[in-house]
Structure formats: C-alpha cells, structure tokens
Amino acid sequence: MSLLAATNLHAGYGGMNILDGVDIAIDAGEIGVIVGPNGAGKSTTLKALFGLLKISEGSVVLNGVDITNAPPDSLVSHGMSFVPQEKNVFLTLSVHENLEMGAFIRRDDYSHLLDHVYDIFEPLKAKRNQPAGELSGGQRQMVAIGRAMMTEPRLLLLDEPTAGLSPLFMSEIFDRIIAINATGVGILMVEQNAKQALKIAHRGFVLASGQNRFTDTGQALLDDPEVARSFLGG
Amino acid sequence: MNELVFFINKVVIAGSVIGSIYALGAIGVTLIFGILRFAHFAHGDMMTVGAGLSLVVAVLLAEAGVSTPLPIGFVAMPIAMVLTALLAIGLDRTFYKPLRDAGVRPVVLVMASVGIMLMMQGLVRLLAGSSTRSFFFSERKDIFRIDLPFLEARRSLVITEPQVLLIAFTVVAVVALHFFLTRTRHGKAMRAMSDNADLARITGINTEQVVWMTWIIGGGLAAAGGTLLSLDVTFKPDLSFNIILPIFAAAIVGGIGRPYGAIAGGFLVGFTETLAIFNWSILLRPFDALFPAWLEVPANLAFVPTEYKITIPFFILVAVLVWRPTGLFKGRVL
C-alpha cells in the first residue's frame, strides 16, 4: 500500500487554480522528489498536501486515511511533518527548545528522539542552547528538519531544503536526508537542484503548469533525454 | 542625611511602586501583542474592572465577617484575578475571536478593543458610580516608618503595607512568569507562537490554547495591577485610563512582544516619571555654601511640574519610536 497517494489535485489562491490535476504517490520509506520550472506548482503541491491551501478537487490519502483538506495540526498527529522553505525555525528559541516544540503534541518521554536528532545533525549538539536565529543557514535548516522529526513522522515534507545554501552545505543536507530516509521515514521534497535531488529519489515527479509532465523513478527521469533537455538543462 | 531619606521616599519607593504597576500592565499588553498581533487598548480598563471586582469581593468577605492580617482587598485579589481572566477569555470569544476568524486586519482588532474599552468604562461607572472608593473601609492602612541608623537622619523611610505587598507581588509574578516561559511546555509554546505563529501551527502547537493562556496571564496580572494600585491610592472608575499611556510606553520601550522588556520598560517609565517631578533643589540645598553667592538654589527645581507628569511617557514613547523603534529588547517594529 502506498504511504501517500494524492490524485488529481486541484488547488490555488483566490479562485485561480495553480494545480491542475497533480498526482503524487510514494510508498513507505521512499524518497519522492518534485522538480520543475518556476511557477510549476511544486511548493503549492506541498502546501495543498499539508492542508495549508484548500483543495478544490482531488483527494489525498495518507496511509489509507483520507486527509483531504484536513487542518495542518491534525496532520501532525497522522504522521506527517512539514518543513517550509522560509521562516522554518523559531528564531528566538534555543536549538533545544525548537526541537522540544517539534514534540509539542507528544505526552510521552521523547528524550531518545532528541538524541537521535543530535546524532543525525551532529553540529547542533554543541549549539543546543544557542538561539536558532544565531545559526548559519545550513544549521538552521538542520534545526528545521530536526524539529519536524520530533513527532516520528512516517512522511516528511521538505520545501526546498537546500535553497540558498552553499554547495558544501547542500550535499551535507542531502546526506542527512538520506540518513533520515534510511531509518524508514518517507520523504517528499521539492528541489531546485533537480539533478542532485533525482539522484537520491526513488520517485520523481516533473511538474509543469500545474500538471505532471513526467512521473517515473528518479534514475529513469535522469536517463530520459527529453526530461534532460527540457528540465535539467541538457 | 534627611535629604537622602527624602530622595528615597520620593523617588526610590515611589518609582518602584508606579514602575511595578506599569510592569504588571505592560506584560499583558506585550504578550497580547506578541500572540494576537494587536494593541489591546482595553487593557487599562481590564485593570479597573479587576480592581472593582476585588473591591466587591472584599466587601462581601468583610460582610461575611472575615478578618485577615493582610488588607482584605489583597486577600480578595486572587479571586478577582480569576474572574478577570475569565472575563478576558469571554471578551475574546465574543468579540476578538470572530474578528480573527474572519481574517480582519490588525487595525480592526485595535478599534474593537477601543470599543470594548469604552464599553467597560461605561459599565464600571454604571455599577460603581463615578466617585472614588477606598479599599480600607473596615480597617486601617498600615504605614511602616523605618528609622535609618544614621546619625542625623531625623526623617524616617515611609512605606505603606499595600506598597510592600505590591512590590513583593511584582517580584513573585515576574519570577513565576520567567519560569513559566522558559521551563514549561506551554510557556515555551507561547514564546514559539509569539516568534512565528504560522510555524507554531504547522508544528502542531495548539494555538487556541496559547491564546487562552495569554488572556489568563494578561487578565490576571491586569486585575492584580489594578487592585494593588487601588490599594495604594483609591479605587476610581478612571483609574487605569490615566495609566494606559505609560503602560503602552513601557511595552514599546521594552520592545513590543518581549515580556522582560515590558518589565524593564515599566520600571524605566516609572522611575523617569518620579525623577522628572522630583524637586532637585532639596538635594542641592545642603551644598548651598559651595555655590557662588550670586547663584541661589531655587525653591522648586523639578524638570516637570507634577500636573504635567503624563507628558513624560509621551516623550519617552516618541523618543523610542524615533530613535529605537524596536525598543530596548529588540521587539517588533509597530
């Protein structure tokens, strides 16, 4: 059974549809990557999936449960976490408090998860008591992803996790995403760095003008000459 | 030495007293702004209503024959704090929440709070009349005179029991607030939502619960501030209308949305006021001999006459907005 199945999504702002029939499906433990030109509706797809945007047509099924238009806070308890592209950490809270807030819905002992996050994002350990606003862009991204992991999600939605990062930080973040995925967490992310992202993707979705243009495994998309010519810059 | 004692009485004690009142009000204003993103102008009247409720409870307690070592108004205060917190939540449910849900701009909420301010003022006058009332209707206000162990000090330090209670309560409230905000799950959630409300929602923080807590703390502290001010002077219907401006000045000086800033801002505004109306010639007079003969120390050497005290917070407010709009603690720019 697929972990996430979104079929024929239609959504937009103020009556204008940006998504015009998007299909996304990934299985448990897979990495799905959404790529495509600017304005294709990549980030809009993630927002619609996470209930931040009203879906006018189509359905979203997570783990067999219909979650179409469910409010974001209920999705967190359904096992889905979302890391927005911008403003994704609490700047005035310490790194540790950011992670604690990620676990807000939990009433059990989650100290093992804190250790787990600090293991994956080693550089955060030394900065745990520093306000997140004082960290570098790459480290903030680690806090943001770490925060989203605190609910032990089955599916992590990442909106351009490497936007604005230097190539060095970029591959570091990609490595960490692979490490998180290795623990069985499904990942669906939007990426500008299409080639690098498709390399680690089990599923790739190339969107254009609010529709799926190509849908295949990451490797197949990379090998497809037409995808390469029109979307990956040759 | 007498002059120094006079200075302590007139500035240190008076400044701490009024600073505490401003801080108790400004914490609420700044928390409400941080969480709900609007200037709550009805906050001053929430203080009046809280004080009025304390008075009612105090009268009821006295009639029931309760007698306590502490002023009866202070004993009644916790009940009034709970009632005011409930009132604040009720007002939010009835007026602010429907507006919030309709997605109105912040200025609409500000105007709504002005409406609620006028409404509460009217209600207080309707129910309590427009005259002043003392909390000490059945007992005497204790005044402590502390003689200083200095040789020539003939004057003594004067502080009243309500003033001691006010300063003590403020210290306890500030420490409790600090522990709440930094040590508890809900306190951290409150800071998180004040920092980034959208992210708080995405994270799964129950934002509606945070809103409730904001009104409980804001309303409770408003009732306490109003009651303690009324214990120090008297209860009057326009009690807090006169202190709402200094309270906003305190919240803005401290950095809007910053609770510690509001506390610092409250004391800053309070002490600036008392220093500005203090008659400095009293401190200069002992040194009269040192001045050249042609220079005479005038009888009154205050920066501002007492009746123009209200200009001080105005001045501070404008100065901060012009030169440091984020306030001392780097809050939001209005």
Image (cartoon, coloured by chain):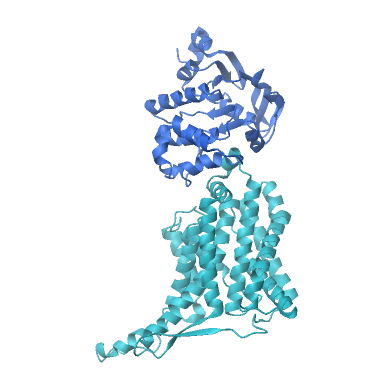
Chain colours: A blue, B cyan
Q: Nearer the viewer, residue A183 or B255?
A: A183
Q: How far from the left and from the top, in percent, is residue B266?
A: 49, 66
Vertical placement of residue B275 versus B195, above or below: below
In the picture, the quarter occupied by the N terminus of chain B is: bottom left
Residue positioned 70% across, 64% down in the render? B83
Q: How far from the left and from the top, in percent, is residue A8?
A: 68, 21
Residue positioned 52% across, 56% down in the render? B179
Vertical placement of residue A176 versus B334, above or below: above
Q: Nearer the viewer, residue B32 or B134?
A: B134
Note whether residue B44 is visible.
no
Q: Nearer the viewer, residue A234 or B67?
A: B67
Vertical placement of residue B216 versus B143, above or below: above
Report the number of discs. Answer: 0
Q: How far from the left and from the top, in percent, is residue B184?
A: 55, 50
Note whether residue A2 is visible.
yes
Q: Determine whether, in the image, residue A219 is placed left or right of residue B8.
A: right
Residue positioned 40% across, 86% down in the render? B300
Q: How far from the left and from the top, in percent, is residue A181?
A: 52, 23
